[in-house]
């Protein structure tokens, strides 16, 4: 199985606080059947000096765990917060998942605005990237039905947190995404080993193997 969204790198964001936590999270994923991990540390343009500085910090965090990790196939990416003007940030395209043309973007937890769609479109077209939208099911309480329809109508890959299967309302949306034949990818969005721990066992109970397989194929589809 492929983990598309998690915060395992130590000390870089609100995820794993140290190397021990990071390695424990990876051990849990491995025990639950995860073979490939995309590490998606938070990237907030207004907090970072530059993309280059962020990548330097990310690499330094990865160096601390790469030789000790129970899962050997780890790809570095980022969960890029969509901010007004983010598509014009120098080197934003370098935050795509390494070795792919896929980038994970996170919509704001606020009322929907037209500029959000414009930023998503610009990043995809300007840099020939496939946009993946993080945990789309979480926005049901923020966006109107029409606005959600607009998001679902995009050509983005819909990233789904495993936790969505534990919510009736969110599960209904997820089942629709799957039934409509849209491209989707599962992730735990794990931050630690306690209240936000890896939860792939939940997904395996709720989703059929062939559905999980469709998610696993996404990484290979967009490799360079």
Image: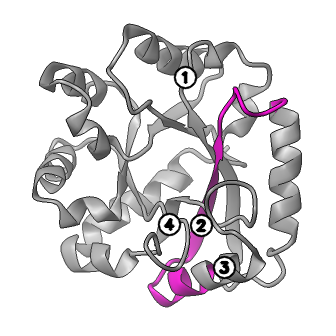
Q: CA distance from mark 2 to mark 3?
A: 16 Å
Q: Which residue ends up furthest to the bottom in the rendered image?
A: 31
**Where is residue 133 shown, x and y percent of the image?**
43, 38
Q: Mark 2 falls on what kind of element?
A: strand
Alpha-carbon neighbours of circle 1 within 10 Å: few (<14), some, or many (≥20)? many
Q: Mark 3 falls on what kind of element?
A: helix
* Mark 4 lies on residue: 190
Residue ID at (30%, 72%) = 203
* Mark 2 lies on residue: 37
Q: CA distance from mark 4 to mark 1?
A: 26 Å
Per the rendered image, the range of residues in magenta is 26-50
Q: CA distance from mark 2 to mark 4?
A: 11 Å
- In the rendered image, the quadrant that contains the C terminus is top right
* Mark 1 lies on residue: 124
**Where is residue 110 shown, x and y percent of the image?**
37, 26
Chain-order first, disc 2 or disc 4: 2
Q: CA distance from mark 1 to mark 2?
A: 23 Å
In the depicted structure, whether residue 57 falls above or below residue 91:
below
Q: Are marks 4 and 1 in contact (CB under 8 Å)?
A: no
- Indicate yes or no whether the magenta region holds residue 187: no
Chain-order first, disc 1 or disc 2: 2
Residue ID at (73%, 33%) = 47
Q: Mark 4 falls on what kind of element?
A: loop
Figure quadrant of residue 181: top left
In the depicted structure, whether residue 153 falls above or below residue 133:
above
In this image, 66 relative to 150: left or right?
A: right
Figure quadrant of residue 43: top right
Chain-order first, disc 2 or disc 3: 3
**Where is residue 28 shown, x and y percent of the image?**
53, 85
* Mark 3 lies on residue: 21
Q: CA distance from mark 1 to mark 3?
A: 34 Å
């Amino acid at each position: 199985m492929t983990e598309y969204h998690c915060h395992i790198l130590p000390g870089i964001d609100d995820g794993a606080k140290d190397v021990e936590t990071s390695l424990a999270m990876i051990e849990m994923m491995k025990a639950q059947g995860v073979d490939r991990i995309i590490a998606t540390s938070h990237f907030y343009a207004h907090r970072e000096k530059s993309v280059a500085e962020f990548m330097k910090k990310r690499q330094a965090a990865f160096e601390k765990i790469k030789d000790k990790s129970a899962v050997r196939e780890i790809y570095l990416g980022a969960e890029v917060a969509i901010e007004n003007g983010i598509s014009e940030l120098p080197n934003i395209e370098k935050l795509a998942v390494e070795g792919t043309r896929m980038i994970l973007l996170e919509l704001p937890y606020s009322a929907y605005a037209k500029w959000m769609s414009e930023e998503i479109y610009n990043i995809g077209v300007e840099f020939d990237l496939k946009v993946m939208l993080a945990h789309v099911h979480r926005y049901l309480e923020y966006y109107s039905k029409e606005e959600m329809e607009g998001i679902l109508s995009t050509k983005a890959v819909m990233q789904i947190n495993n936790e969505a299967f534990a919510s009736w309302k969110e599960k209904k949306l997820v089942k629709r995404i799957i039934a409509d034949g849209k491209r989707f990818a599962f992730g735990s969005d794990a931050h630690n080993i306690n209240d936000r721990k890896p939860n792939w066992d939940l997904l395996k109970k709720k989703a059929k193997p062939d559905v999980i397989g469709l998610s696993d194929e996404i990484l290979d589809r967009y490799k360079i």
